[in-house]
Image (spheres, rainbow, N blue to C red):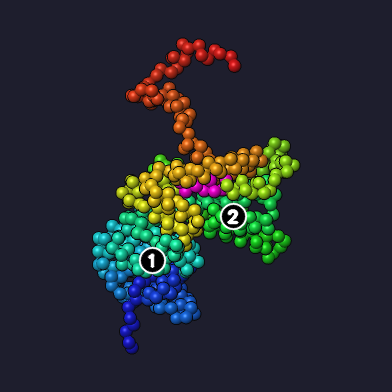
């Protein structure tokens, strides 16, 4: 039997994402070897490659045969569940790998696990990349956004492959070498946090339009489709328009109304908020989206709270006043602007989190370039990411997206609509935590003077934490209680 030619790359872990990424790589003309502990997964993938017209994909049931079937220096992508399965897969495969070979973990891994594995791999002469992969199964198959970080040499070995496999947009493939260490995983984590925020904000827009505006699913489908032709153009807006169109096969009306209002999650959103807290970066919109998922999980509690507060008469005060005959067209236009402005604040938070981490770890992240590789392939892909990219190109040290001259102008143009929507929602008792968090972030950030002076005074009073003054240098402590007793100021009757 003739010895088979060696593959250019290998991929282990053939769940949906792994299969699709392997087929994508093969389709771009790079012969690939695939492996999975479960033999049927290998056969399934080989079957798909054959069905798609004989893509250059070789299946292996033995980890040794798999590794040896790849040309050196080897690059092996692993796509298994984050955590222990990654360590297991590495130990299975690495025993057959040789110095100079590289492992590329494409899962949603915690960045510190990647940094540990980089050290362990390098002790054996192996290279390592932690590569964020976004775009779901369709992205993996037809062009994902890829966020590789770790060994630059390992990146060099697969650059020609990933630049062909990634989504392609007007200014290039949606992949770049992100930086050292676990930076690729960290960037993917923040991408997911931003994704949480986007989804929350869209759900709030839906809630306001449906409950206050009284819009039907048919109207919502039309409006989201229209929004997708303007400044909000994005994957999430597009799929939302589609969702409203799907009828319920088990009954009347549309499927969306029959879905239980309890959101699942896998952890990257939580990590994002934890990291924001660790780094003292305000990320209130992303945090609000996480809180909302927690509250959505309390379905039974919410149902009983609704009953209790209904009996206590809440609807007398906060029921939606349709009688005020909300003008639909105006409301739709306001909600669109509120959504856009809220989104900018959410992205500003995510970007600032990335910058803070980059400074802590000396990753030297290029925020404009990260916005660019999110323009295609990934779940948060959107037209306005091009504008974010340009904002950071104009000014690499931009303190906050909000103060980029173009975004600043847009925020100001939309603030009226934004405040109307949030005000209307608050009055009607429709919670819009994401939009409120974004607006509060905006209003806090843009105000030169905040009531933090009073908090400082309180801290100094009860804890002698001292304070600074606005009119002279140094730190000060005051005997507040004693001076207050002596003063007559409290005697004024209002
Ligand atoms: C193979 O498939 C199984 C089941 O689908 C999965 O749990 C496992 O992580 C996969 N990966 C490897 C490398 O065996």
Asked if residue 256 is among those painted magenta in the image, a careful observer would answer: no
User: Does 214 sit above or below residue 480?
Assistant: below
Q: Residues within 10 Å of mark 1 (few under 14, many from 20)?
A: some
Left or right of 406 on screen, residue 153: left
The x and y percentages for residue 368 are: 40, 52
Q: Residue at x 44, y 48 (%)?
A: 350
The quadrant of the picture occupied by the C terminus is top right
Q: Nearer the viewer, residue 492 or 14?
A: 492
Left or right of 215 on screen, residue 175: left
Left or right of 39 on screen, residue 437: right
Q: What residue sits right under mark 2 in the picture? A: 227
Left or right of 249 on screen, residue 264: left
The x and y percentages for residue 164 are: 40, 68
Q: Residue at x 68, y 38 (%)?
A: 318
Q: CA distance from mark 2 to mark 1?
A: 31 Å
Q: What residue sits right under mark 1 in the picture? A: 163
Q: Main secondary structure of the magenta part?
A: helix
Q: Quick one: SS at disc 2? A: helix
Q: Indicate the quadrant where residue 463 lies.
A: top left
Q: Quick one: SS at disc 1? A: helix
Asked if residue 340 is among those painted magenta in the image, a careful observer would answer: yes
Q: Residues within 10 Å of mark 2 (few under 14, many from 20)?
A: some
The magenta segment is 338-349
Q: Indicate the quadrant where residue 324 lies.
A: top right
**Sequence-wise first label, 2 or 1:** 1
The x and y percentages for residue 81 are: 43, 62
User: Does 136 sit above or below residue 318?
Assistant: below
């Amino acid at each position: 039997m003739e010895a088979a030619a060696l593959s250019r790359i290998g991929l282990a872990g053939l769940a949906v994402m792994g299969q699709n990424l392997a087929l994508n790589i093969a389709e771009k003309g790079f012969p690939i070897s695939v492996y999975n502990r479960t033999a049927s997964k290998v056969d399934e993938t080989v079957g798909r490659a054959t069905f798609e017209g004989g893509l250059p994909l070789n299946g292996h049931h033995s980890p040794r045969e798999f590794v040896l079937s790849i040309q050196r220096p080897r690059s092996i992508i692993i796509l298994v569940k984050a955590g222990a399965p990654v360590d297991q897969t590495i130990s299975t495969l690495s025993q057959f790998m040789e110095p100079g070979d590289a492992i590329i973990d494409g899962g949603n891994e915690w960045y510190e696990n990647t940094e540990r594995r980089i050290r362990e791999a390098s002790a054996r002469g192996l290279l390592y990349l932690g590569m964020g992969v976004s775009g779901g199964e369709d992205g993996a198959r037809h062009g994902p956004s890829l966020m590789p970080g770790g060994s630059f040499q390992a990146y060099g070995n697969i650059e020609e492959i990933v630049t062909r496999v990634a989504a392609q947009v007007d200014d290039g493939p949606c992949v770049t070498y992100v930086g050292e260490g676990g930076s690729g995983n960290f960037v993917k984590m923040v991408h997911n946090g931003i994704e949480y925020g986007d989804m929350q904000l869209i759900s709030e827009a839906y809630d306001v339009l449906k409950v206050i505006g009284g819009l039907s699913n048919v109207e919502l489908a039309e409006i989201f489709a229209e929004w997708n032709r303007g400044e909000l153009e994005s994957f999430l807006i597009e799929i939302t328009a589609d969702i409203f169109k799907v009828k319920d096969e088990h009954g009347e009306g549309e499927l969306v109304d029959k879905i239980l209002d309890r959101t699942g999650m896998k952890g990257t959103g939580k990590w994002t908020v934890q990291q924001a807290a660790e780094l003292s970066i305000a990320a209130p919109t992303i945090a609000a989206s996480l809180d909302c998922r927690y509250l959505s999980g309390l379905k039974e509690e919410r149902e009983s709270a609704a009953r209790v507060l209904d009996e206590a008469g809440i609807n007398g005060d906060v029921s939606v006043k349709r009688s005020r005959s909300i003008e639909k067209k105006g409301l739709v236009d306001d909600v669109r602007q509120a959504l856009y402005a809220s989104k900018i604040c959410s992205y500003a938070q995510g970007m600032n989190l990335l910058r803070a981490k980059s400074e802590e770890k000396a990753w030297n992240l290029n925020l404009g370039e990260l916005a660019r590789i999110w323009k295609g392939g990934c779940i948060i892909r959107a037209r306005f990411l091009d504008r974010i990219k340009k904002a950071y190109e104009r000014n690499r040290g931009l303190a906050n997206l909000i103060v980029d001259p173009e975004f600043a102008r847009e925020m100001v143009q939309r603030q009226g609509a934004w405040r109307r929507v949030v005000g209307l929602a608050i009055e009607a008792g429709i919670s819009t935590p994401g939009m409120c968090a974004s607006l509060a972030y905006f209003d806090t950030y843009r105000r030169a003077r905040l009531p933090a002076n009073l908090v400082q005074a309180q801290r100094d009073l009860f804890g002698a934490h001292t304070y600074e003054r606005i009119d002279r240098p140094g730190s000060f402590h005051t005997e507040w209680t004693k001076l207050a007793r002596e003063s007559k100021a409290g005697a004024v009757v209002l």
